[in-house]
Amino acid sequence: MRPLSPFVTSLVILHWTSAGPAPANGDPIDFGAQNLSYSPSPLNLSVFIESTGSQLHAPVVGNTYGELQGQEARNGDPFLSTAKLIVSVERAFANPPKQLAAVVEKIDEEAEMIAARAMAAKIAAGYEGRVSAAHQKEEVIGNQLQREMHDDHQRLQLWKRKLVEPGYSYRNDVEVQRFLQRGKKDELAKLFFQLREYPELKERVEAMQRELLGEHPEALPEVLDVWLQLKLIPEDAFVMMPVSTILSEHDFQDDVSNLVIASHVNDWLTYVNKYRSLGHFSDFRVVKLLMEGREMPWMVTMLDLLDRNFGKDELKFQALICEDLRKGVNPAHLHSLNEFSAILNAKDGRIEKSGWLAIASKLESWIDYVDEYNMHANGPFTDNDVITALQTKIRPPDVTNMFLWLRRVPGMENRAKAVLKIKATRRQSKYDEWIEMEKDPKDIFSWTPIGRAADLGPGTDEARWVVILSKFEDWIDYVTKYRATVGEFSDLQIVETLVSKRNSDEAKKIIDHLQSVPDMKELADRLALQLYFYSLLESKSTPAAVFDKIDIAMFQPLSGAPVEKSDWSAVLFELEVWLDYVDVYRRWFGAFSVDEELQVLKSNRQTVEVLVLFNKLRGVPRMKKRAEHLQRRLLEQSTDSFALRAAFSVWIKFNVSPEDVFLMLPFPLTTSGVEAAGKTAKSAIVDYLIGCWMAYVRNYRSPGHEFNHDQVVEVLKKNGHEEAAEEYLHSVKDVPAS
């Protein structure tokens, strides 16, 4: 343990011996007093009771700390009376040393304040100067922003009044001409964008912008850049570009005019492609906008021009399904489904990355069609219908792969995930059957394609990886369900299974590729860490040696500044990882007992610190039972009553239910094979622990928690203490549980 300094110790002893009785308000023991009752006596509770004829003595208060310090100095007397070592929990709760804790806290605070003042004295002048300068700078910037906002508002109001004047023309506007002459067409575009926000000016400003771009086509690149900065959606950009006017006023005539029309359409398509880095805008929406009010022959001619002059041929598929939408064709009857089938069958499923991306683009348009159909036609056409329609033409595994690639299309991640979730639900019946049979995830892995797949050498293309990762995700889904309903299967066991069926190199490849899968990066990070721990297992590193490699080995929750929530999360994660390592190490090598596990965790830590750590760990659902088992074993190992009293204090702070507390108390597991005197001693231990637990129940109720008499009786009976339950019922007859 880490002793208090002589100065602090003297203050503490003085306060302990002179403070008198503490308020009997039922408050728990404060952690600040944790060192005061520590006794490293080699005896355990049963030895004390047996050595004194099983008589439990009243507690000694006042000079307990001094007596135990004296015992430490004398190196411990194995036959000290029980009264000096077994302090009644009842009295400990009734008279907690609150003032003592306050003194210790005050000393700590004053020490920190002295250090802080010393540091502050060195930097005060410079700091004050920097703060003053920063405040002045902030004030100047704030005033400047306010002036600019005011000036901007004033300017817009002037423009607003100017635009509504009868006979106004931007061609005669000196300020507009000044913008154009000085090459500030980008600033003019920003001004028009702001003026569009006024509903009464919107159409007029859009017309002005169209005409200006028609008269000054050289300004288009600058204007498009401004619109991108302002995140103007492509539909609005279309209205503000000359293309919208040209398409409405002209039809295809000679080759020259046709090329002009196609050129303006291409300008807008250029903006659409740039906008896609900011947001989703599918090819289907592009074609739908271009075809608005026009017939299919017109669109065929336009697409042919775009293909011949600008190399853009990707919109023909979308034009066909746009025409189908006009006719209200059910999505399941679209000819486009036959295209999917033809591509997949022609390649016999062996499609390169570029091929899958092309399929994903077509699938995006078909999904957009489904959404438009549901919105304007004769829907609904559900995601279940989507899967059914595709699987009538395409093999189910290929349908899955299509949506896995669709997840990579910007803006389609959530849509693809929704359909994949439906497919996963269809697969659940098989999982449910395996879960009912409690099939081990290791066995399930052997049955999956990834468990039987061929070597994943350098020649494995990206399309093949998509399939492999899909199957791995399926297996992870089963593991998740297994954890929730059957039992434990840790991340380290996932890696162990992966390596056993593949090898370490291929396991690393799978985990590395998993990083690119949406929603799987966190799992990939965890598995990468576990792969490192697996290598330690292969090198036969002991859990004690591994513990020294992780940050938790240096963690001291009560020795410094308050522990932040994020710090606790990191500590608990590392503790989980280490405990999983311990489990696999035991299974592999048959070594490293629970006592050795505790010894590592207790190393350089005080009992209270270990108890706090365990009760934080109880908050992790999969670790709750493990943390409770470790606490029980810690108390069984205890050589004095301090650990038990500290445990009650920690439990009350963590609001641990009396039912859970009872299971963590070190009750003797059996009395068979013990002599009569030994049985009597163990009976005394049981009585003592039940008495301590009753005191905890009363303290648990005091802040307002409910735990009534019936619950007390139920816990006692459920754990085999029928006689104690009857005595309790008799003692509390007609007494409310409050």
Image (cartoon, rainbow, N blue to C red):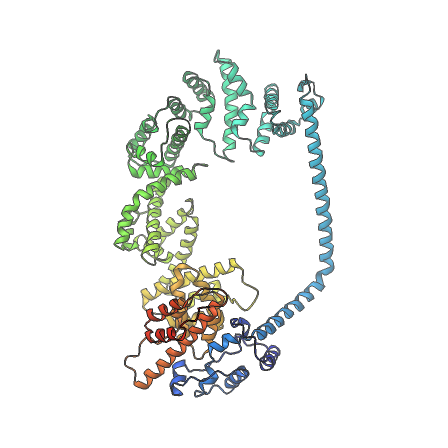
User: Residue, x 61% and y 18% (percent of image)?
Assistant: 215
Outermost residue toward the top?
254
Residue 28 in sight: yes
**How many numbered discs, if any?**
0
Q: What percent of the width, then of the height, locates residue 504?
A: 35, 54
Q: Is residue 701 above or below residue 511?
A: below
| 455 or 676: nearer the viewer | 676
The reply, left or right, for residue 512 in relation to residue 673 is right
| 620 or 114: nearer the viewer | 620
User: Residue, x 37% and y 62% (percent of image)?
Assistant: 537
Which of the 4 quarters of the picture holds residue 342? top left
User: Residue, x 44% and y 28% (percent of image)?
Assistant: 283
Q: What percent of the width, then of the height, locates residue 84?
A: 48, 84
Q: What percent of the width, then of the height, locates residue 470?
A: 35, 44
Q: What percent of the width, then of the height, locates residue 509?
A: 38, 49
Q: Is residue 171 above or below residue 184?
A: above
Q: Is residue 428 above or below residue 678?
A: above
| 552 or 52: nearer the viewer | 52
Residue 603 in sight: no
The reply, left or right, for residue 117 in relation to residue 499 is right
Which of the 4 quarters of the picture holds residue 380? top left
| 533 or 7: nearer the viewer | 7
